[in-house]
Amino acid sequence: MQDKQIEKLIKEEEKRQKSVINLIASENYVSSDVLKALGSKLTNKYAEGYPGKRYYGGNTVIDKVENLAISRALKLFKLKPTEWHVNVQLLSGSPANFALYSALVPLGGKIMGMKLTSGGHLTHGHPLSMTGKLWKPLQFELDSKTEVIDYDALKKIAKAEKPDIIVCGFTAYPRVVDFKKFREIADAVVYPDGRRGALLHVDMSHFAGLVAGGAYPSPFPYADSVMTTTHKSLRGPRQALLFVKKDERGFDKKLDKMVIPGLFGGPHENNIAAVAVALEEATKPDFKKYAKQVVKNAKVLARELKKSGWHIISGGTDSHLILVDTWMDGKGISGKEAGIKLEDAGIIVNMNTIPGDKRSVMDPSGIRLGTCAETTRGAKEVDMVKLAFKMNKILRA
């Protein structure tokens, strides 16, 4: 590499990644094939538009790449192309959710989503996000005692407030989501003009790889739309996929029109190719074993930390994700301090708010852990037992 400064920094980051234990729930390690696609000459091509309908010439090969990514995305999640449409041009999760709302929800309409401190995402209608500025946010919280979703309470809120769309998904919620109950909640909404049924949008960014690997329920039988990033449990590059149902409502055409020319320009075809590689990798038997091991590892890590006296939100996990209350009403340490202590010892986590958190988001009461990255490196249950012991020792020092 001619640019020695950048080459040096890349090598430094490679060394850092190899030297730490990575428990960031939203990170993973891609294969060499994914990296090859990312660094390919596909990055040289401008391809505004869609396969067969480009604004630029010279896209014969690019069309094949994008069509392959589309067919692989549908195949991985067992979707019929006559029933579902997927747009593979979204650059990441936040703009993907924004594109979905822009296409299907009128400006000023209501978005009902999980509150950030309960485990939701900024783009689920948080007041500081544009999704909470251009649309009316209706944020729900977890049950304060059980620290899980109270579906009956949600149904009452939805029937009373009549949201246009209900967002089901999380960034820091460790339990399985009951998509069937969310569908029932959406269907229970009756609008003043007699229309029935809110839209149900599932953000499966965190658990998409677990769905693909059969380690987490699929949202597709119940959702109107589904979004996922591809760089978390799917073990792909930084990109997003946005699925919508194909029916008389015309969601597929509305979405594509909103993505281009509505919001974006030329897609990153090298990323799309890398996504296609990752989607194919996720169809292999080894990936199914991987997904199941991710959950096994998370359950053991949560159990062992709980045994050590730490408060695990909701009592455990059903996924790759664990939320730990390190503050414990002032008896422990803040999430920020916990994160610093662990990083000093070579264990990387992120500080995180917990349900009902009264501390600042910049110094919250907890930390978020995830087992995807370390499972990719080959970690098993025995490693999680040792890791929990080490973490407990560090945090109590």
Image: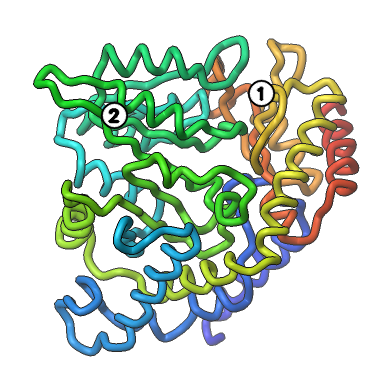
Q: Residue at x 32, y 43 (%)?
A: 224
Residue 9 visible from this viewpoint:
no
Residue 174 visible from this viewpoint:
yes
Where is residue 36 drawn, in percent x and y? 54, 80
Circle 1 SS class: helix
Mark earlier in primary sequence (1, 2): 2
Where is residue 389 drawn, in percent x and y? 89, 36
**In terms of image quadrants, where is residue 34?**
bottom right
Where is residue 368 drawn, in percent x and y? 64, 35
329 relative to 235 in the view: left or right: right
Badge 1 local density, few (<14 within 10 Å), some, or many (20+)?
Answer: many
**In terms of image quadrants, where is residue 363?**
top right
Q: Quadrant of the N terminus?
A: bottom right
Circle 2 SS class: strand
In the figure, 125 relative to 278: above or below?
Answer: above
Residue of label 1: 313
Q: Amino acid at mark 1?
A: Ile
The colour style of the image is rainbow
In the figure, 351 relative to 80: above or below?
Answer: above
**In terms of image quadrants, where is residue 396?**
top right
Q: Residue at x 16, y 29 (%)?
A: 108
Q: Quadrant of the C terminus?
A: top right
The residue closer to the viewer here, 262 or 80, is 80
Badge 2 local density, few (<14 within 10 Å), some, or many (20+)?
Answer: many
Q: How many marks?
A: 2
Where is residue 97 drawn, in percent x and y? 33, 45
Q: Amino acid at mark 2?
A: Ile
In the figure, 386 relative to 192: above or below?
Answer: below
Residue of label 2: 111
Mark 1 and mark 2 in contact? Answer it, CB < 8 Å.
no
The residue closer to the viewer here, 275 or 70, is 70
The residue closer to the viewer here, 314 or 183, is 183
